[in-house]
Amino acid sequence: MASSTSSSMDGIIIFLGLLGNITTGLVYLAPIKTFWRIVMNRSTEEFESDPYVWKLINAYFWVYYGVLKPHSVLVATVNGFGAVLELIFVTLFLIFAPPRMRAKTAILFGFLDVVFPAGTVLITQLFLKRKAQIDVAGFFCVCFSMAAYGSPLSAMKTVVTTKSVEYMPFLLSFFLFINGGVWTLYAVITRDWFIGLPNGTGFVLGTAQLILYAIYYKRPQQLKKSSDNLEDGWERQPLIPESDQATPKA
């Protein structure tokens, strides 16, 4: 009986891990539209590189954590995929950004995505035992994930201020909500609070974003009617293009 229950629980954990991999992969893929635009225009325009630099180091440490901790290969694989994508995104900033942004990106990338993670891995491998290595990697995962999950707060403030969801794409908010929920449930079952803390926060923030979306969403017909009702002589304001949000990963 106990063996059957244990086997069933293992199946649930594997299922949640696979589902978490899918949702995390979708979150990592969310900025593809933005970077396609950057490549087509051969310019990063007003987009900032900071979120992608931070998401890259976040992915690094989740890979390291997944490699160190037993039975966490699913955590390592999806974040390995994410690390490759974020590396491509940062490289595109180094190619297409204006000189000042390119220099800033290069400095941040050099320190945060090369020197710091390499130094951390080297020091932990040389001087710490496996349990301490897992704890250090998990600590940095929580720190960088919380920073990544906190980045949408500015977009949420903009939504409330402008009463418009243009700055907060629905699919990204939805994927953050689902991803946070899946990994939080996974963390509760496996009792892995390094995974649970940042993703529980992400689940709460994702829920808040969907609530804001429901409150401030305006149908295209409403927008058109509002535009058509402008009095003669009023200048029509151009729509502001959607901006991309940064995203943490499990």
Image (cartoon, rainbow, N blue to C red):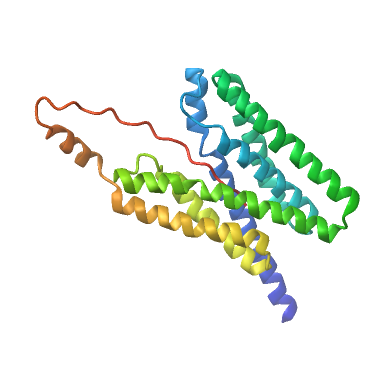
Relative depth, front residue between 240 and 169? 240
Which quadrant: the N terminus? bottom right
Residue 99 % position (x, y): 57, 18
Relative depth, front residue between 195 and 10? 195
Residue at the outermost left position: 232
For residue 92, above or below residue 111: above
The answer to whether residue 146 is left or right of residue 113 is left
The answer to whether residue 225 is left or right of residue 167 is left
Residue 20 appears in the picture as rendered: yes
Question: Where on the picture, by quarter, is residue 105?
Answer: top right
The answer to whether residue 150 is left or right of residue 220 is right
What's the residue at 18%, 26% (across, down)? 235
Residue 38 % position (x, y): 50, 24
Residue 241 % position (x, y): 37, 31
What's the residue at 42%, 44% (across, down)? 155
Relative depth, front residue between 81 and 240? 240
Question: Where on the picture, by quarter, is residue 72?
Answer: bottom right
Residue 23 % position (x, y): 55, 50
Question: Where on the picture, by quarter, is residue 59?
Answer: top right
The answer to whether residue 109 is left or right of residue 153 is right
Residue at the outermost bottom position: 1
For residue 146, above or below residue 27: below
Residue 74 appears in the picture as rendered: no
